[in-house]
Image (tube, rainbow, N blue to C red):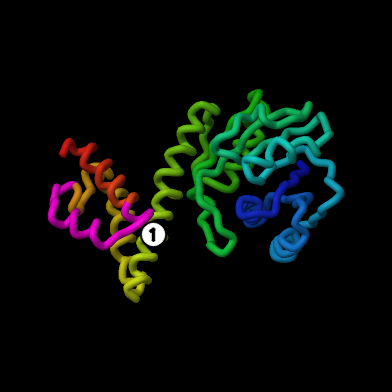
């Protein structure tokens, strides 16, 4: 089976690496960014191109959501399976006469961070059982957690991921701004962050909540508000309001 990955960003890199590490041959990695493609090609020993798309049985589109539809139009072959890796887009966004599908890896990807691919959930959607089996077989060589999901369900999976990952990481960035402003090393807070994440492996997040908002400690809440300004103050107020509303305080 000839497989081509389209893209040169974080998802494309990790998908290509996951395939190579699990002895799934790649015919090509294709995209516009020659510099990044060359780096991936040299590391993973996979051919790359910026102008000639190889003939393949399966094309995996790993680009930003805004680019999926446009990129899908470069695939003119009809007798092939095309899949995208978006958490939010329907398979019908793919604009060709080929067979359409999606293969969504539920993970945050950065090229500089090593990952255990075997633990990443993959969600599969396809037009027919044969194509579903192709994607299940491929993903199962990478991960032990492969599941079917409709587009409707996948939208909520992605939305949950934004709350659990993207928003939380933004709060880490805001927290680091505060610690940096007072010349407090941010690594002091890493054991706290690690314990917070580890705790919800054993306790429901709602039961694990601590802090001044859930205690309704108005004196501390007011003190903290005096120390903050601009966006961080608004975030602090919004988060505390949400916490207190959840606990009917």
Q: Examine the rendered structure and indicate whether residue 72 appears above or below residue 177.
A: above
Magenta span of residues = 214-233
Choose top left, top right, bottom left or bottom right for residue 207. top left
Tag 1's secondary structure?
A: helix
Viewer-closest of 24 and 97: 97
Choose top left, top right, bottom left or bottom right for residue 103. top right
Q: Dot 1, crowdedness within 10 Å: few (<14), some or many (≥20)?
A: some
Q: Residue at coordinates 72% horizontally, 64% vertically from top-left? A: 39
Q: Quadrant of the N terminus?
A: top right
Q: Examine the rendered structure and indicate whether residue 76 appears above or below residue 141.
A: above
Q: Examine the rendered structure and indicate whether residue 66 appears above or below residue 34.
A: above
- Magenta run includes residue 135: no
Q: Which residue is mark 1?
A: 174
Q: Residue at coordinates 60% horizontally, 36% vertically from top-left? A: 136
- Residue 35 in the image, given as x and y percentages of width and height: 75, 63
Residue 75 vs residue 245: left or right?
right
Residue 192 vs residue 166: left or right?
left
* Residue 144 appears in the rendering: no
């Amino acid at each position: 089976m000839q497989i081509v990955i389209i893209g040169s960003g974080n998802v494309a890199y990790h998908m290509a690496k996951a395939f190579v590490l699990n002895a799934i041959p790649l015919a090509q990695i294709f995209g516009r960014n020659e510099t990044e493609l060359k780096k991936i090609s040299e590391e993973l020993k996979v051919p790359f191109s910026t102008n000639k798309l190889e003939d393949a049985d399966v094309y995996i589109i790993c680009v930003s959501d805004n680019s999926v539809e446009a990129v899908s139009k470069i695939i003119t072959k009809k007798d092939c399976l095309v899949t995208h890796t978006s958490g939010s887009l329907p398979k019908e966004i793919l604009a060709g006469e080929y067979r359409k599908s999606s293969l969504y890896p539920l993970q945050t990807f950065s090229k500089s961070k090593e990952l255990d691919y075997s633990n990443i959930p993959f969600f599969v959607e396809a037009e027919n059982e044969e194509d579903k089996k192709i994607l299940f077989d491929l993903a199962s060589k990478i991960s032990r957690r492969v599941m079917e999901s409709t587009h409707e369900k996948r939208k909520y999976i992605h939305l949950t991921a934004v709350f659990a990952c993207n928003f939380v990481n933004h709060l880490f960035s805001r927290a680091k701004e505060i610690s940096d402003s007072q010349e407090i090393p941010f690594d002091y807070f890493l054991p706290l962050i690690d314990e917070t994440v580890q705790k919800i492996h054993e306790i429901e997040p709602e039961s694990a909540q601590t802090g001044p908002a859930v205690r309704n400690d108005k004196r501390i809440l007011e003190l903290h508000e005096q120390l903050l300004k601009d966006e961080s103050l608004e975030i602090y107020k919004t988060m505390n309001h949400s916490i207190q509303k959840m606990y009917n305080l």
